[in-house]
Image: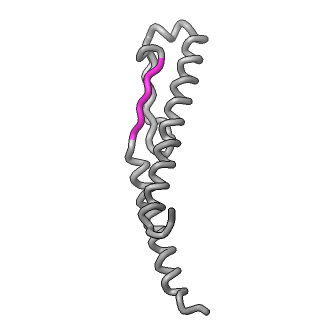
């Protein structure tokens, strides 16, 4: 009954190693988006953390436009990161053999 427990343990160790590798790879990726014709530029890493933000000086006097452009840039960047995380996770699962 427990003959394959060693194989299961090895599989779980391999999964944990692959998950950590994926996490490290995602942290090293960057995703940049521009909003308002480049007036706002936002860069996130693969974990969804903001690592850079550039705002055109013209927007500093127009709070409402700045808020709208920031919201759009943040949402677009988050979508890019989420899609990449999903694709990476599916790729990792597909590479485990037998999991489809």
Answer whether residue 31 is magenta in the image: yes
User: Image point 53% across, 87% down: which residue?
Assistant: 4
| Chief secondary structure of the magenta portion | strand
Rendered image quadrant of residue 74: top right
User: Image point 43% across, 14% down: which residue?
Assistant: 37
Rendered image quadrant of residue 42: top left
Answer whether residue 10 is magenta in the image: no
Q: Is residue 5 left or right of residue 43?
A: right
On the image, the x and y values in percent for residue 17 come to: 44, 67
User: Image point 43% across, 22% down: which residue?
Assistant: 34
Q: Residue 28 versus residue 8: which sits nearer the camera?
A: 8
User: Image point 43% across, 49% down: which residue?
Assistant: 26
Marker count (numbered) = 0
* Magenta segment: 30-35
Q: Is residue 85 left or right of residue 1?
A: left
Q: Is residue 80 above or below residue 62?
A: below
Q: Split into 4 quadrants, where in the image is the N terminus?
A: bottom right
On the image, the x and y values in percent for residue 54 come to: 43, 22
Q: Identify the coloring.
A: one colour
Q: Is residue 25 above or below residue 15?
A: above
On the image, the x and y values in percent for residue 40 come to: 46, 19
């Amino acid at each position: 009954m427990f003959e394959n427990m060693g194989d299961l343990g090895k599989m779980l160790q391999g999964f944990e190693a692959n998950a950590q590798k994926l996490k490290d790879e995602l942290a090293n990726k960057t995703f940049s988006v521009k909003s308002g014709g480049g007036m706002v530029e936002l860069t996130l890493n693969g974990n969804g953390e903001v690592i850079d933000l550039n705002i055109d000086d013209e927007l500093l006097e127009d709070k409402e436009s700045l808020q709208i452009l920031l919201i759009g840039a943040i949402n677009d960047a988050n979508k890019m990161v989420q899609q990449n995380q999903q694709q990476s996770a599916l790729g990792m699962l597909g590479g485990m053999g037998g999991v489809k």
